[in-house]
Image (tube, grey):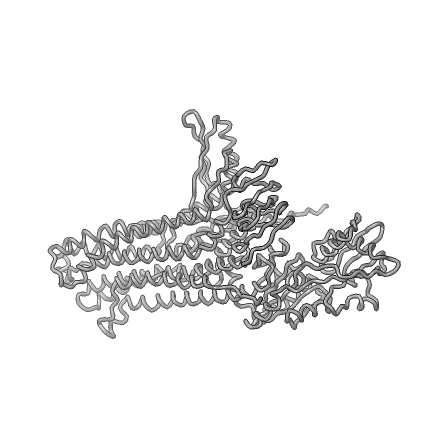
Amino acid sequence: MEARHDPDPAPAQELALPIEGMTCAACAVRIERKLSKADGVDQAAVNYATEEALVRVAPGGAGLADLVRAVESAGYSVRTAAAETSVPGPAEADGTAARVRTVRGVLEVRVREEGGAYLVETRFVRGVTDPVVLARAMGVDVAPTEAEGDALEREHDARRRYLRLRFVVSAILTVPVAVLGMSHGLFHVPGANWIAFALTTPVVAWSGAEFFRLAWRAARHGAADMNTLVAAGVGTAWAVSVAALVAPRFFVSAGAQPDVYFEAAAVIVTLLLFGRFLEERAKGRTGAAIRSLMTLQPPEARVRDRGEERLIPAGEALPGMEVVVRPGERIPVDGDVVEGRSSVDESMVTGEPLPVERGPGDRVVAGTLNTTGAFVCVVRRTGRDTLLQRIVEAVRKAQGQKPPIQDLADRVAAVFVPIVIAVAAASALVWWAWGPEPQWNHAVMRFVTVLIIACPCALGLATPTAIVVASGVAARLGILVRNGAALETLARVGRVAFDKTGTLTLGSPVLATVRPEAPFDETQLVRWSASVEALSEHPIARAIVDAAAARGILPAKVVDFTMESGRGVGATVDGHAIRVGTAAWTGLTGDGSDRLERDDTGATVITISVDGRSAGFLTVRDSLRPTAATTVSTLRHLGVDSVMVTGDGEPAARHVAALAGIHDVRAGLLPGDKEAFISSVRGHGPAVAFVGDGMNDAPALARADVGFAMGSGTDIAMQASDVTLVRPDPLLVADAIRLSRRTVRTIRSNLFFAFVYNVILIPVAAGALYPLHPDLLLNPMLASAAMAASSVSVVGNSLRLRRFERLQTKP
């Protein structure tokens, strides 16, 4: 019976859903739970700071519409947009609708007739649907669209303006109420309580309406959040005041004073709105880095077609098109320069501060700034396939993934509100039963104060704001961290293992010497070696191929190509069995092999065999990266040990290690040996990081606690890594560790403050210090100020990470 080969499983789908309506950490936890219960959802992480849900769904699992319904079932919504197009007939409408339904992110498509024409209407998720792809499916011209970062900034500005309006109106109405309420009889104003009622009611009913609306929405879904606490506290203060104003005799007959608390209700709403406004503004600054990246890519591209130039939407540029870039313009696509020469400022994408020269054959990146000259490039990637957009996506994912340090805060946030309500109710009952006169008034005040001072927001903002700021700073420096867990693990790294070629060295080796053995000559040796190495991606292979081309030697046709990673390559060339690589690979294991692999100058020795006999050897040299030695010394200063693991021979490896200042060298390792070495040192003390750039580094990158892939490396290495360095600078490894440690310290201080704030002030609000002194009772208005300040202080502490600067090397 023939064995059936099961195909590789389809990759899981990852979606970033923009969420609307979250106001605290409990909201994020509730949405996560709903999304996690959806069919096929492997992981759901909701970030309160960025207002996004990152969801990973297994093949065949819940669709986008199912995920949106899950969010809505929790009482929240997914940010969507609408579009429509008109077509002449029903057949065209059905065809357009069918095409639109295949576009990623489309939730709903409807067709309706209007005035003899047919309208195709669609609703799609913002940020998931590519507007260019949607426009093509709808059969309409693609107009230059507003950059996604600009759209997000505009939405945040609108939200901040609305919050500011509510706060200003509330403050204007609250000031006279507060003066009347806290004057203690200094001002005799006829009908003062009715005036306070008239001014406070619009503050509660309009400025504070959102608290009540969101609290009701949570209650309808069987949940409670921060809005529940505010609505209960403010509503109680206002309702008791109205009752005392309308029916004071009832309170007197019940043995209570008919006091009013309008000033408390008004001041609480005003201060909380002020806190929300400051928090919203601070949260906007935490995401400024990623939004600035999103705005870099220009909306239009100037394409050259048959000698004529025309502007088209950048998303419409296709691979192979020629794009003209003038001085002062941002480059709209990823491409290869074919004409002209210029200096390009790549600092916003790669973090490299100085402009770099770009000419024919060089690659340019979308979003970078052309400074001096004009050039023409051939399009390689556009839209969401560009390096810039992949950086944005990587940063988004890092911000959406929660580090383990957040778990405790999430568990507390999930039960925080019910516990606070229980504490508030219990304190009110205690004061009503055993408190001093007037007991009823004391009970109301303690109930309101406990509800208002409790702050789950600080818990929810403690970790995500720090992660958002840190990942944005890292992206600005040219460091892409895959997730929050990697950022946290980086802080524990105590040993870094470096690959040699392309990591500590430039990765651009050159052929130094050719030493044939009789009866072969140099031309044969170079021709056969280049012919076989042309099929390899290793930097040494490229050096041999380039050397052959420089000498005018054309490669021959090869058959039966074989490769063993870390050892060498082989093929049949001109009827001869050619092997190029280590002495063990070529079969030269006699007494001469030691001599062949020994080079005290640091050159790598490549042996060649023809039909099983030695044909000679080549030496290839590579230069140390300028920042390699600084990297090692900086890591040593940080308490991090460095080790070199390489497939090169011992002499070459030790020569480069000595130049870099590395004392621990593991040479002659195959890819499996590198992985085994990483496995052997993991779990014994601090975390272990591995830095590499090649395909043969992928196993070790995946095995390390944190894997760094150099930006000049292969896609396979980058996929296996936790951190990608956009530019090939090993000093970024030290920067990443420093940033990680500072981030973790910030998160811990945020969490400490959030926990201590609630643990100390909730009992104080309940009246725990009253037995020590009657004046040690917290006023609800002070409680609202403390609550607003707690969230703002946590966000402000996280924003301090924006001051982080990379290490500077000495010229």
Percent coordinates x, y for residue 607 in the rendering? 79, 61
Instruction: Tell me if residue 29 can be seen.
Output: no
Percent coordinates x, y for residue 140 in the rendering? 50, 34
Q: In which quarter of the image is residue 302?
A: top right
Q: In this view, does 536 lie to the left or right of 34?
A: right
**Residue placed farthest to the bottom in the image?**
772
Q: In which quarter of the image is residue 579?
A: bottom right
Quarter of the picture containing the C terminus is bottom right
**In the rendered view, would you say 285 is above or below 808?**
above
Nearer to the camera, 417 or 511: 511
**In the rendered view, would you say 791 is above or below 82?**
below
**Residue placed farthest to the right in the image?**
519
Instruction: Tell me if residue 421 can be seen.
Output: yes
Q: Residue at x 88, y 60 (%)?
A: 518
**In the rendered view, would you say 95 is above or below 236?**
above
Nearer to the camera, 83 or 419: 83
Q: In this view, does 16 lie to the left or right of 701?
A: left
